[in-house]
């Protein structure tokens, strides 16, 4: 049985776990927790970048990053499930996923800067640059939020907004009521969203 090296707060891991559920193949892998800060964790042998999520197949082949794991899931589900086959829809969904991943990247490095560096060591310029990415991405998400079928675009959007709720106290909500409505609907339709929500963040 393939294993997913992962950790609950990771928005990229959550995206993969929700995508498996949306594709109807939640049992495609079992989850094996990984500690990205532990040099002795086998994760660094599986993924030289030491990042999660990382999917390890039965023959030991490691698949990363999350976008490639999504490709794998789509193949397992028979194709055209998470990633539309029709070229225009495919590029739109993948670009939207890149937008959501980019927001998550900016939010994750902001979190690292705040947690790992003492206040005087933090770079206000760097943090501003990340905040700008998050703001512009939210604006684009509000304008282009996916409608209709649940594919990687909607799963990625739910992961991104969920991470802002987890680490940034949901401050996005006041400015983007349309996205709040969108996320409420996603949560109602996709039980994996609530099932993967971190209840008591550390
Ligand atoms: N592009 C990667 C990003 C993954 C990522 O940034 N994962 C974070 C956790 S959310 C991580 O492993 N950080 C540990 C590190 O960078 O050493 C993906 O899509 O999987």
Image (spheres, rainbow, N blue to C red):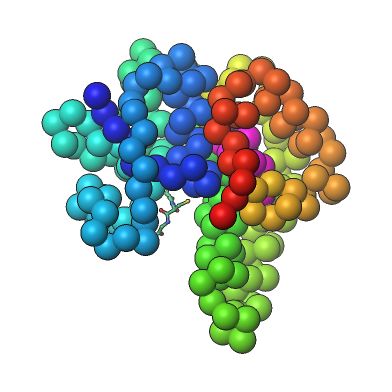
Q: In which quarter of the image is residue 71?
A: top left
In the visual, does 193 lie left or right of 24?
A: right
Query: Residue 93: in sight, yes or no?
Result: no
Q: Which residue is drawn at 46% across and 14% down?
A: 24
Q: Where is residue 84 in the image (x, y as percent from the top left)?
A: 49, 21
Q: Which of 105 and 5 is in front in this view?
A: 5
Instruction: In the rendered view, tell whether residue 130 sits above or below residue 141.
Output: below
Q: Position of residue 36 (x, y in %)?
A: 36, 56
Report the predominant secondary structure element of the magenta stretch.
Answer: helix
Q: Residue at x 50, y 37 (%)?
A: 14
In the visual, does 146 lie left or right of 100?
A: right
Q: Which residue is drawn at 52% across and 46% down?
A: 9
**Magenta-colored span:** 155-164
Q: Where is residue 50 in the image (x, y as percent from the top left)?
A: 31, 56
Q: Is the C terminus in the top left, top right, bottom left or bottom right quadrant?
A: bottom right
Q: Which residue is drawn at 18% across and 28% down?
A: 58
Q: Where is residue 195 in the image (x, y as percent from the top left)?
A: 57, 28
Q: Is the N terminus in the top left, top right, bottom left or bottom right quadrant?
A: top left
In the visual, does 157 lie left or right of 8?
A: right
Q: In which quarter of the image is residue 5?
A: top left
Residue 160 inside the magenta-drawn segment: yes
In the visual, does 154 lie left or right of 78?
A: right
Q: Nearer the viewer, residue 75 or 140?
A: 75
Query: Residue 170: in sight, yes or no?
Result: yes
Instruction: In the rendered view, tell whether residue 190 sits above or below residue 117.
Output: above
């Amino acid at each position: 049985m393939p294993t997913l090296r992962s950790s609950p707060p990771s928005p990229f891991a959550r995206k993969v776990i929700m995508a498996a559920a949306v594709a109807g193949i939640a049992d495609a892998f079992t989850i094996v927790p990984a500690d990205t800060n532990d040099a002795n964790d086998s994760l660094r042998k599986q993924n030289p970048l030491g990042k999660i999520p990382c999917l390890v197949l039965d023959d030991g082949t490691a698949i990363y990053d999350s976008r490639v794991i999504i490709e794998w899931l789509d193949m397992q589900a028979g194709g055209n499930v998470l990633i539309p086959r029709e070229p225009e829809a495919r590029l739109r969904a993948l670009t939207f996923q890149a937008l959501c991943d980019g927001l998550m990247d900016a939010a994750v490095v902001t979190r690292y800067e705040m947690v790992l560096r003492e206040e005087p060591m933090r770079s206000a310029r760097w943090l501003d640059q990340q905040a700008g990415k998050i703001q512009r991405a939210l604006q684009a998400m509000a304008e282009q939020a996916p409608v209709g079928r649940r594919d990687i675009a909607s799963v990625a959007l739910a992961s991104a907004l969920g991470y802002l709720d987890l680490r940034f106290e949901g401050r996005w909500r006041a400015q983007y009521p349309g996205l709040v409505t969108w996320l409420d609907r996603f949560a109602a339709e996709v039980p994996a969203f609530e099932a993967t929500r971190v209840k008591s963040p550390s």
